[in-house]
Amino acid sequence: MKVGVLALQGAVAEHIKMIELAGAEAVAVKRVEQLDALEGIIVPGGESTTISKLINKYDFFNALIQFSNQKKPIFGTCAGLIILAKEINGTTENHLALMDIKVERNSFGRQKESFEVDLEVKGISDHFRAVFIRAPHIIEGKKNVEVLSVHEDKIVAARQGHLLATAFHPELTDDPSMHHYFIKMVKEYRG
């Protein structure tokens, strides 16, 4: 099973390590053609506007939408969550607009307010160590969006069918639980 990490910006090597710990083959994705060989992909954290510009520059926009239309799982972390969202609070811009969620950028403060906290993540862990760095949160999700975790009354992890999103960085811990969950999703949607 091959799972990719969109390698345009962000914590690519860390996600690759976690995918491998979770038992799948990991691929750093730099070209659109690589998507055909994948069964799932992670859109990592970084800077959402920059990632979006690079998605357009390297012709990933329609290719990632088609990837999703094939029900191949996509996991967005932090900025990746913003990239997947249908609506971003305070702006008319959107990115891939795949997931029926409305998000707020920088919900927990700037870089210097970064923090770690243990979270209960439904179906994954009662004590998942979550790393928040200039993190967004999900303001609301439509009926088809399952809330997986909440911190300070803010939704920080959710799933919608083959789409998974976290406001935090699971790749910056030693716990591959979130990546195991994503690999399980990939197996569910395989073939």
Image: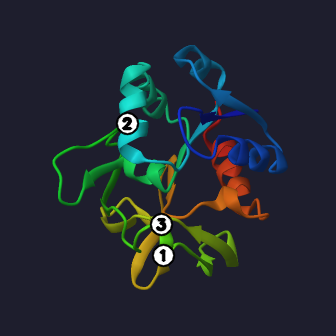
Mark 1 falls on what kind of element? helix
- Where is residue 79 drawn, in percent x and y? 45, 51
Determine whether, in the image, residue 7 is placed left or right of residue 23: left
Residue with the mark numbered 1: 113
Q: Which residue is label 3 attached to?
A: 111
Q: Amino acid at mark 2?
A: Ser
Quarter placement of the C terminus: top right
Q: Which mark is residue 52?
A: 2
Quarter of the rendering containing residue 62: top left
> Residue at the location (44% across, 24% down)?
60
Which one is in front, 50 or 155?
50
Is residue 84 at all visible to an observer of this figure? no
Amino acid type, residue under disc 1 in the picture: Glu
For label 2, the crowd category at 10 Å Cα-Cα, with few meaning under 14, some 14 to 19 and many 20 or more, is: many
Depth order, front residue of 30/115 = 115
Circles 3 and 1, Cβ within 8 Å, touching? The answer is yes
Neighbours of disc 3 within 10 Å: few (<14), some (14-19), many (20+): few
Q: CA distance from mark 3 to mark 1?
A: 5 Å
